C-alpha cells in the first residue's frame, strides 16, 4: 500500500513524515531523492549540460542549483524540460526502492502531488495543513528569508482548501503533541486498511 503525503511549504509535511517513520513506516522523500540523483547521475549531468550549457556543472562536478533555479524561475518551458529530465528517473528509482521495503505500507512525501495530478499513483493521500500565517512564519524562521520570498515560493502551490477536497486524509499541524496523536490515530487506521 502506497500513501502519498503532501502539504504546502511550511505545513510540516517533513515533520509529519518523520512521525510516521518513528512508527516504523518507510518514507520516500521525493525532493531529497531528486537532489541525490541530480548530484550523482552522470547521465543527468549530460542532459543538464545539453539544456543549460557546460557551466551548469561547477568545479566540484556538481550541478549548480542556483544557476538552474535562476534560469528556470521565469521560463516555464525550461522548467518543464528540467522536470522531464529529473522526474522519470525519480519515478524509476521509487519503483526499485519500493520493492526493497517491508513495512506494512510506505509513504511517498512530495510538495506537489495534486498540482501534478499524481494522486492516482497512490492508494491513499494525506494532506498536512496549517494556517497560512503560521506556515509563512515557520519558513521565515527556518530558512532565514523574508515573508515576501516565502509568499513567492507559495505561488506555485494550490490552496489548502482545494487540496483538502481531493485528499483522503487531513492532518492539521499546529500543536505538535496534537499532531503526534493524530498521526498515531491515522497510522492505526491505515494499518486496518492494509489488513482489510
Ligand atoms: P517545506 O515544503 O518547506 O520543506 P515542510 O512542509 O516539509 O516544508 P517542515 O520542514 O516539516 O515543513 O516544517 C517547517 C518548519 O516548521 C520546520 O522548521 C519545523 O521544525 C517547524 N514545524 C513544523 N511543524 C511544527 C509545529 N507543529 N509546531 C512548531 N513548529 C513546527
Image: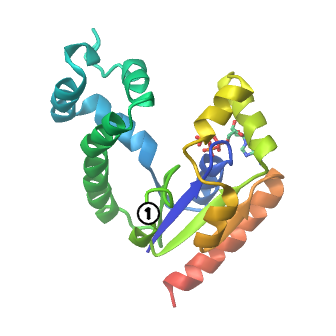
Residue pictured at 21% horizontal, 18% vertical:
53
Residue pictured at 75% horizontal, 55% vertical:
173
Residue pictured at 77% horizontal, 64% vertical:
181
Image quadrant where residue 182 sits: bottom right
Mark 1 neighbour class, 10 Å CA radius: few under 14, some 14 to 19, many 20 or more: few
Q: Quadrant of the N terminus?
A: bottom left
Query: Residue 105 in the image: x percent, y percent?
Result: 47, 70
Q: Is residue 55 above or below residue 123?
A: above
Image quadrant where residue 190 sits: bottom right
The residue labelled by disc 1 is 117
Query: Residue 146 in the image: x percent, y percent?
Result: 71, 23
Ligand 1 image position (quadrant): top right
In front of the other: 146 or 144: 146
Is any part of residue 97 visible from this angle? yes
| Mark count | 1
Would residue 143 appear left or right of 57 to someone viewing this image?
right
In front of the other: 133 or 11: 133
Q: Kindly state the secondary structure of the residue where label 1 is placed.
A: loop
Residue pictured at 68% horizontal, 67% vertical:
170
Amino acid at each position: 500500500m502506497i500513501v502519498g503525503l503532501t502539504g504546502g511549504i511550511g505545513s510540516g509535511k517533513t515533520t509529519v513524515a518523520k512521525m510516521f517513520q518513528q512508527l516504523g513506516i518507510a518514507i520516500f522523500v521525493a525532493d531529497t531523492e531528486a537532489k541525490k540523483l541530480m548530484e550523482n547521475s552522470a547521465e543527468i549531468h549530460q542532459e543538464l549540460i545539453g539544456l543549460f550549457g557546460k557551466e551548469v556543472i561547477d568545479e566540484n562536478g556538481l550541478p549548480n542549483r542556483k544557476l538552474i533555479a535562476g534560469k528556470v524561475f521565469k521560463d516555464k518551458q525550461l522548467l518543464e524540460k528540467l522536470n522531464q529530465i529529473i522526474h522519470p528517473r525519480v519515478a524509476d528509482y521509487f519503483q526499485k526502492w519500493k520493492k526493497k521495503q517491508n513495512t506494512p505500507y510506505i509513504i511517498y512525501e512530495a510538495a506537489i502531488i495534486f498540482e501534478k495530478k499524481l494522486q492516482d499513483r497512490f492508494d491513499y493521500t494525506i494532506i498536512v495543513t496549517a494556517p497560512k500565517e503560521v506556515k509563512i512564519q515557520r519558513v521565515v524562521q527556518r530558512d532565514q528569508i523574508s515573508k515576501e520570498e516565502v509568499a513567492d515560493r507559495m505561488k506555485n502551490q494550490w490552496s489548502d482548501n482545494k487540496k483538502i477536497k481531493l485528499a483522503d486524509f487531513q492532518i492539521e499541524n499546529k500543536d505538535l503533541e496534537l499532531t503526534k496523536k493524530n498521526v498515531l490515530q491515522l497510522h492505526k487506521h491505515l494499518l486496518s486498511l492494509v489488513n482489510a
